[in-house]
Amino acid sequence: MNPIHQAPTLLAGPNPFARGYDNLCIERLLLITYENDCPPCVRPVHHSQAHLSDDELQLFPCLFNDDFALISEGQSIPDALDERCQSAGLVRQVLYTVTSESLNERHHVGDLYSLEAAQEMIHRLSFETGHYSRAWEISTAHLPEEAMRYLERWLDNSAPKLTGLLFELFTLPDCSGIGCKLIGTPWTDENLSNIEGKPYSALKQEQRDAGTPKALVKVLHLAALADVRLLIFDPDAAVLAGLAVFDE
C-alpha cells in the first residue's frame, strides 16, 4: 500500500474537486462464518499461508483472531500462532477486495471473486496515459469581485507574464473565461517538499504575500489538493456543489 500524503485542512466537508480513485490496490480476504448467531467476518490469510491457492482456502475450517486467519485442516500451525487464535470458523468465500486512496483516507471500492476480476476492475478504473477529471470548468460565482479584478488585471497586459507561484493564468479568446494551470500538484507537504523544497504552508504564504486574494488561494489549493491541473473560471459555467458562492 502506498504511503498516505499529508494533506492540509481547507474545509470541514469533502473537497468538491475530489473525483475518481487513486492508488488502487488489491487485498485477498477470507469471508468466514462461525457461531450461528454471529454475522460473517473477513480476515486476511496469515502470511505463513499466503502461498495457498484459493481452492486450498475456500470451504476449509480455519482459526482466526482480530488480525488474521489460518487454515486448520491439512496445514501445520505453529503452537505460537495457534495460541493467538481464539475463534474457529469456516471459510465460505475468498474475496479480492479493491480499495483506493482519496486525499488522506482509504476507501472500499468493491469485492471480487477472483484476482483476474479485481485486476480488470483496476484496469477499467485507471488510465495509464493520465488521470480523468483533471480539467475543470466552474462558475466565476465562486470568486468574489476582488479575486476577479485580480485575474483581469494580471491578464490585461500586452506582454505575457508569469506568476511564479505554481499557477499560471491564460485567457480564452472565444469566451469570457479565464484559465489557470496548476503546477506541481497535488499541493501536499510531501509533494511540494520534493519538487519545491518547501511545505504547503510556505507556498500558501508566498501566494498571499504576492497579493493573491485569499478566496482565490483557497479555491486553487482545493483544486490542487485533488490533483486538478487545469481550472477554468467562466460566468456561463455551472456552480460546483460544495464550493463557496459569492455571486449567483
Image: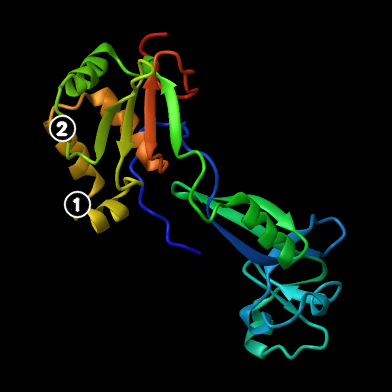
Q: Residue at position x 25%, y 19% from top?
A: 147
Can the viewer see residue 160 in this picture?
yes
Q: Please state which amino acid type lies under the numbered disc 1.
A: Lys
Q: Residue at position x 44%, y 35% from top?
A: 135
Q: Quadrant of residue 75?
A: bottom right
Quadrant containing the C terminus in the rendered view: top left
Q: Position of residue 61 (x, y in %)?
A: 83, 76
Judged left or right of residue 160, residue 115 is right
Which residue is disc 1 drawn over? 198
Q: Residue at position x 19%, y 51% from top?
A: 198
Q: Position of residue 122 (x, y in %)?
A: 63, 56
Residue 182 vs residue 29, the one in the foreground: 182
Q: In what element is the residue under mark 2?
A: loop
Q: Please state which amino acid type lies under the numbered disc 2.
A: Lys
Could you tell me how many numbered marks the image carries? 2
Q: Nearer the viewer, mark 2 or mark 1?
A: 2
For this orientation, the residue located farthest to the top is 248
Is residue 130 depicted above or below 79 in this figure? above
Q: In what element is the residue under mark 1?
A: loop
Which residue is disc 2 drawn over? 161
For this orientation, the residue located farthest to the left is 209
Neighbourhood count class around disc 2 (C-alpha, 10 Å): few under 14, some 14–19, many 20 upward = few
Residue 76 vs residue 228, the one in the foreground: 228
